[in-house]
Amino acid sequence: MQYLGSCHCGNVKFRVEGEITSAVTCNCSICQRKGVRMAFFPRSALTLLTPEDKLSTYTFNKHVIHHRFCPVCGIHTHGEGVDPKGNPMSAVNINCIENIDVDALPVQRYDGRSL
Ligand SMILES: [Zn+2]
């Protein structure tokens, strides 16, 4: 399955390949503030359709996760990091994907606050 997503203003566009079967929410300090719902993919499954320099990057704490967002409209599109085995991963904000009904997906709560 292929999904297309974008920020609000369209400055940032992306395509991701895989299956979205649940909506992951997280209670860590940043996810809670953003109200983001996510799906995780290998980094190679995510293709930016926008030049890298059109995105901004926010990091905090150990600076291991790159939180990418549109500097024009402020919408967070995805995060980039590595899984526990060191494989590059992306956490896509599925609220940015237009051809799915995010509210229909089962919610999987992740306790990021306790880590
Ligand atoms: Zn934008």
Image (cartoon, rainbow, N blue to C red):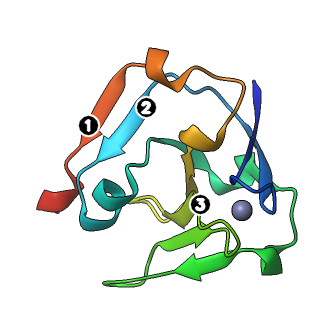
- The residue carrying mark 3 has its beta carbon less than 8 Å from ligand 1: yes
Q: Residue furthest top?
A: 104
Q: Is residue 110 above or below residue 89?
A: above
Q: Is residue 6 above or below residue 94?
A: below
Question: How far is mark 1 from mark 3, CA to CA?
Answer: 22 Å
From the image, tell me which residue sits under label 2.
23
Check disc 1 and give the amino acid type.
Answer: Arg
Which corner quadrant of the image does residue 34 belong to? Answer: bottom left
- Left or right: where 45 falls relative to 78: right
Crowdedness near tag 2: few (<14), some (14–19) or many (≥20) residues, C-alpha within 10 Å: many
Please report whichever mark, 1 or 3, sits nearer to the chain's N-terminal start: 3
Residues at circles 1 and 2 in contact by the CB criterion of under 8 Å? no
Q: Is residue 45 above or below residue 86?
A: above
Residue 26 screen position, x and y as percent: 29, 48
Q: Secondary structure at mark 2?
A: strand
From the image, tell me which residue sits under label 3.
75
Ligand 1's quadrant is bottom right
Residue 61 screen position, x and y as percent: 31, 84
From the image, tell me which residue sits under label 1.
109
Crowdedness near tag 1: few (<14), some (14–19) or many (≥20) residues, C-alpha within 10 Å: few
- Left or right: where 40 falls relative to 70: left
Name the residue: 80% across, 81% down. Answer: 53
Residue 76 screen position, x and y as percent: 56, 60
Q: Is residue 60 above or below residue 32?
A: below
Check disc 3 and give the amino acid type.
Answer: Ile
Q: Nearer the viewer, mark 1 or mark 3?
A: 3
Say which quadrant the C terminus sits in. Answer: bottom left
Question: How far is mark 1 from mark 2, CA to CA?
Answer: 8 Å
